[in-house]
Image (cartoon, coloured by chain):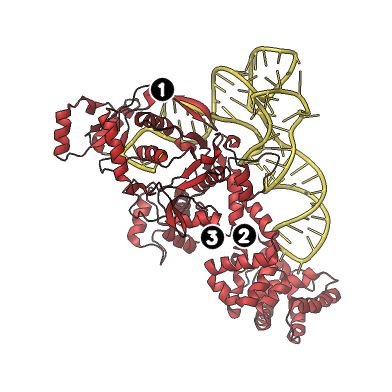
Chain colours: A red, B yellow
Amino acid sequence: MSDTASIVTRFAPSPSGNLHVGGARTALFCWAFAKGRGGRFVLRIEDTDQKRSSDAASIGFAKDLHWLGIFWDEGPLWQGTGGGEHGPYFQSERLDIYNAQLQRLIDAGHAYYAFETAAELDAKRKAATAAGRAYRYDRAALQLDSAQVSANLASGMPAVIRLKCPGRDVTICDEVLGEATIPATEIDDFVIRKADGFPTYHFAVVVDDELMRITHVLRAQEHFTNTARHMLLQDALGFRRPVYAHLPIICNPDGSKMSKRDKDKALRKAVAERSLTSPPAATVDASVWNAWLADKNIQLDLDAAQRLADSIGVALPEINVDDFKRSGYLPEVIVNFLALNGWSPGNDIEKFDLEFLRTHFDPRRVVKTPAKFDRAKLLSFNCDAITSMPAEEFERRAAAHGSAYHPDFMARLGPSGFTMLARASQERSKTLDEMFRGNRFLLVADDELCWEMGKQVQKAMLDGSPCGADHLEALLPILEGHASWSAADLEALVKPFADERAAGQLGKVAQPLRVAVAGGTVSPPIFDTLAILGRESSLARIRRCVTHFKSLREANTR
RNA sequence: GGCCCCAUCGUCUAGCCUGGUCCAGGACACCUCCCUUUCAAGGAGGACACAUGGGUUCAAAUCCCAUUGGGGUCACCA
């Protein structure tokens, strides 16, 4: 690690429209490590699985990377960044390169063709497992003479290429895990080119890391044992050995691996609890629904999952960076919190920004243990960030969030209403989304507001004498006689009323008012709420409420 | 199951390499009280961990071994 000027790291995901938080953290650490040492950060797309990469251009996750503030020096061209002299950066466009390297291996006797079908291998694997043995490829294809191989190839028989492993133990040196030796018996002659002509992950990684001059490989710990294979490949090809650092996995609170499948899991649970047998209207069509219910391995696409969740009223767990964005988390908070999963700068520092991470990140301070993703702490960090930002900034960012995710809300409020709501909401917002999610009553038509008789409403409206409903009724004519409707004016009007009628206990008056206009006991500060709603709307709601509770009480006394 | 790795509060972690300053520090969550027009936020307190068992040593969270527990991995996925 002495020649810091030439440090090159890479983030190498498979193509996807969304960036997973685990991937985001890997990208973050790769970026920080390289950029903090004057090096380069490369983005490479691992799209060698034709089944999964039907849409090779789908690097929608690039937007997530940019949102977090991570930009690549080299990689796919995307919104003004990318390019570079080691491209192409899509592996599917590098087949010629792999084939040339593959040929070198064949020529040198380090690799060989094999003709077993996937089904045959599968059967052997099952048999081995049933017999309680670990399956290893039996090298049957190595017995084929070269004439036979040529004939098979010439006849167009499907073939894979396997690496001929040297049969020695491999010792991995890892910056975070230290040294580990994988016994030779654990590594069989693995496939390096698939029958479809594409290289496997192992082969493409090794070739590209060499050709793209990658010096440091930071990746998730699930790749740790793969490293032995990669080292064998490097030796066979005569390549350099990059420095490895394997990052601990990020898991759910229950210890399971955080996965996009968790969304489907949550949905299946909700569907089962509600005993739904057919899909709610306008969510997914019946055939998809049936297939999904029948097979736990089938995942709904993201949009369909979201529609279904909205329809049955369940919150999907946030898994992708975009999910957290939608939930109203700030990118700088995500960056901060993600970095804290698996790494810490020491000295009891835990609030920091991207720039701090860039200058302080060191893989040697990465912990070895898997981290459980603690949403409560993330939420707390987000709250701190929101409540400490300047009011104008909060307003601007909340407006952007609202326009993207709650256009109906923005339209209903109008610019001045939005400003009032934003000002009233900042100090009680843990996310940018809360002011929208929590104030649905603002969207309800005045004559459609309902008052559900929960314990809190009961207490606010009917307990004591005079009760809240009495106060409300007395207050109504005073409000009706008042033209000005600013929060300050309303406060100046209601405070004296409370002093006189409720012994100065503003709550005795504010709560009934709140219930009247919001339908429940939770809203922004009451005078702000009234001002946001406006005079006509507020009065209409209060009148209806007075009537509503009056008839309710009459019915009860009868 | 084979192999590899790991093990400090419920959670994220500091400390471990270079044993003594650690009857273990911070943060989130939790509990209590205060403040309060709701909900939050805020203020003040509090409870909470070195997995277990053996060594080594004058001395171990720190070094060694075993056990137990957890994770990862064993594909023509990446």
Specify few, some or many for label 2: CA neighbours under 10 Å numbering under 14, 14-19, or 20 or more.
Answer: many
Q: Mark 3 points at which residue?
A: A326
The three-letter amino acid code for the residue at tag 2 is Thr
The three-letter amino acid code for the residue at tag 1 is Asp
Q: Where is residue A235 in the image (x, y as percent from the top left)?
A: 38, 28
Q: Name the residue under label 1.
A: A169
Q: Examine the rendered structure and indicate whether residue A384 appears above or below residue A159.
A: below
Work out whether residue A555 can be spotted.
Answer: no
Q: Position of residue A161 (x, y in %)?
A: 27, 35
Give the structural element (helix, strand or loop) at label 1. Answer: loop
Q: Which of A135 and A551 is in front in this view?
A: A135
The three-letter amino acid code for the residue at tag 3 is Arg
Q: Quadrant of the N terminus of chain A?
A: top right
Residue A360, located in which quarter of the rendered image?
Answer: top right
In the displayed structure image, the side of residue A125 where residue A398 appears, left or right: right
Q: Examine the rendered structure and indicate whether residue A146 appears above or below residue A248.
A: above
Residue A156, located in which quarter of the rendered image?
Answer: top left
In the displayed structure image, the side of residue A288 where residue A383 appears, left or right: right
Q: Which of A102 and A420 is in front in this view?
A: A102
Chain label for disc 1? A
Badges 1 and 2, same chain: yes
Specify few, some or many for label 3: CA neighbours under 10 Å numbering under 14, 14-19, or 20 or more.
Answer: some
Q: Name the residue under label 2.
A: A431
Task: Give the Cα distance between marks 1 and 2.
Answer: 51 Å
